Image (spheres, helix red, strand yellow):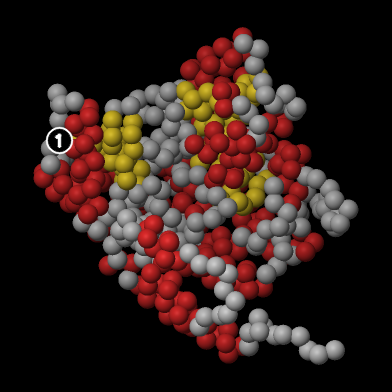
């Protein structure tokens, strides 16, 4: 029999050359981040997308040409989320260390859904989960897994709560959120079979926090209707204002009402590494489950989330399902088959991208960087408050704050237009990129400091840009 084709089997020199060419582009890109615009103009995005649309190629193209396409046309047409001036939404820094970890994980291509297939890599991810459990104060019986982000973590949390609290009585179940809770929780409830009308959005207090007393009233009203309240979602850093709920009060209410308490700490959870963060999120260790996003507070690349459960057994009771073609699952409580506690069977070795930077630098480096972000946000709030006509409507509870230009006596519509104009002027400068939000008081501007590349020099530029824009409108 003739030997088969080997076009996809690259030689060592070809692989080395590809890595060198790619690295040249990557290093140049990262090195130029401080001088790049904080956000590129994406208004021509539809034209770019249409120009890139193509059918399946039958013949190949030179690697150099493909690199040029990516770095000269595709990558620049985007929000510059990895840059120091990106203060919009919730930044994701994208540590280079994690990219190297992904290169290793993808190149060796080991399967970690089942412990037996790659015990060492499975244990490395289990170590990461155990580290995270320790950060939030969970006991040894806790468990969890890495996901692609907070949305999927919230989905598994809702399904686990449904299984633990409702069983088959799904349609009578009720979920409670605040009006500042991330929309992925309501979507998760719908995907978990909870009718949209059974998701109660409760108004927050003046700080945007969910009130435990209001929760109790809503639960009592639903029980009188014959419904089954089963889940409340607390927030450890909301998207609009960075609000952190009174987690101790929510935990007490959940315990007395028989509810599963899930805390969405995708943004704020890793501030538990700091003394101020632990004080702000006191009570988070009493939650039944917690969503974390390492691609936020640990500055990792997008696509790195985590779900933790105080009782790791709840994850197994919800997700485990046997098939004859699978090897035996681990019976030792210290060993984990991730397919048994999560929705995924096929999965990559994503624990490596968390493990490598933490092992290289230690938790202290991340703690110090997070403390710096808390300091910068507090400094920014004080500077903004000193600008005539600017009100800080949501002081930073962590590293996110909201503010607006205020002109007493003017209609809300006019003030919203003025503040949108301030936002456009600030972003037009190109050095920082902010986003806005709509609160009950009207349109506000937001600053979220959460990149390991953002320091005092760029924050000074941000405040100067706001000061200049406010004076112009």
Report the residue at 57% width, 17% height from top.
Answer: 219
Residue 13 rendering spot, x and y as whole percentages: 58, 90
Point out the image quarter for the N terminus.
bottom right
Q: Secondary structure at mark 1?
A: loop
Residue 422 rendering spot, x and y as whole percentages: 20, 44
Report the residue at 67% width, 55% height from top.
Answer: 126
Number of numbered discs overlaid on the protein picture: 1
Q: Which residue is mark 1?
A: 389
Q: Residue furthest top?
A: 224
Report the residue at 48% width, 37% height from top.
Answer: 182
Q: Is residue 473 left or right of residue 377?
A: left
Q: Nearer the viewer, residue 406 or 309?
A: 406
Residue 431 rendering spot, x and y as whole percentages: 25, 58
Report the residue at 39% width, 24% height from top.
Answer: 205
Q: Is residue 470 left or right of residue 72?
A: left
Q: Is residue 317 left or right of residue 109?
A: right
Point out the image quarter for the C terminus.
top left
Image quarter of residue 197 = top right
Residue 56 appears in the rendering = yes
Image quarter of residue 14 = bottom right
Q: Is residue 294 above or below residue 279?
A: below
Q: Is residue 374 above or below residue 117?
A: above
Q: Nearer the viewer, residue 77 or 433?
A: 77
Mark 1 is surrounded, within 10 Å at the Cα level, by few (under 14), some (14 to 19) or many (20 or more) other residues, namely some
């Amino acid at each position: 029999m003739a030997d088969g084709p080997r076009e996809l089997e690259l030689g060592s020199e070809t692989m080395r050359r590809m890595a060198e060419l790619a690295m040249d582009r990557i290093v140049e890109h990262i090195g130029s981040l401080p001088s790049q615009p904080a956000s590129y103009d994406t208004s021509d995005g539809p034209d770019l997308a249409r120009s890139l649309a193509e059918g399946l190629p039958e013949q190949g193209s030179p690697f150099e040409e493909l690199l040029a396409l990516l770095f000269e046309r595709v990558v620049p047409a985007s929000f510059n989320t990895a840059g120091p001036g990106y203060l919009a939404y919730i930044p994701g820094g994208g540590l280079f260390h994690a990219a190297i970890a992904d290169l290793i994980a993808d190149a060796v291509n080991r399967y970690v859904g089942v412990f037996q297939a790659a015990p060492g890599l499975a244990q490395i991810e289990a170590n990461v989960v155990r580290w995270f459990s320790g950060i939030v104060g969970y006991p040894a019986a806790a468990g969890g897994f890495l996901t692609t982000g907070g949305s999927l973590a919230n989905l598994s949390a809702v399904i686990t709560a449904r299984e633990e609290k409702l069983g088959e009585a799904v349609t009578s179940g009720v979920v409670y959120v605040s009006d500042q809770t991330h929309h992925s929780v309501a979507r998760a409830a719908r995907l978990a079979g909870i009718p949209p009308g059974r998701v109660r959005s409760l108004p927050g207090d003046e700080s945007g926090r969910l009130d435990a007393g209001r929760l109790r009233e809503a639960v009592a009203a639903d029980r009188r209707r014959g419904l089954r309240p089963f889940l409340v979602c607390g927030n450890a850093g909301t998207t609009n204002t960075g609000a952190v709920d009174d987690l101790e009060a929510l935990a007490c209410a959940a315990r007395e009402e028989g509810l599963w308490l899930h805390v969405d700490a995708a943004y704020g959870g890793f501030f538990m590494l700091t003394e101020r963060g632990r004080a702000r999120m006191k009570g988070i260790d009493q939650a039944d489950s917690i969503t974390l996003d390492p691609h936020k507070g640990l500055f990792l690349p997008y696509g790195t989330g985590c779900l933790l459960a105080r009782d790791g057994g709840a994850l197994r009771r919800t997700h485990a399902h046997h098939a004859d073609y699978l090897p035996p699952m681990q019976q030792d409580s210290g060993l984990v088959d991730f397919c048994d506690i999560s929705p995924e069977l096929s999965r990559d070795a994503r624990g490596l991208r968390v493990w490598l930077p933490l092992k290289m630098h230690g938790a202290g480096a991340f703690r110090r960087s997070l403390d710096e972000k808390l300091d910068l946000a507090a400094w920014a709030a004080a500077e903004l408050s000193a600008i005539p006509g600017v009100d800080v409507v949501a002081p930073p509870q962590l590293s996110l704050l909201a503010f607006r230009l205020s002109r007493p006596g003017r209609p809300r519509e006019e003030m919203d237009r003025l503040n949108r104009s301030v936002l456009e002027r600030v972003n037009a400068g190109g050095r920082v990129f902010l986003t806005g939000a709509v609160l009950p008081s009207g349109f506000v501007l937001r600053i979220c400091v959460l990149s390991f590349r953002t320091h005092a020099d760029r924050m000074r530029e941000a405040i100067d840009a706001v000061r200049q824009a406010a004076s112009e409108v």
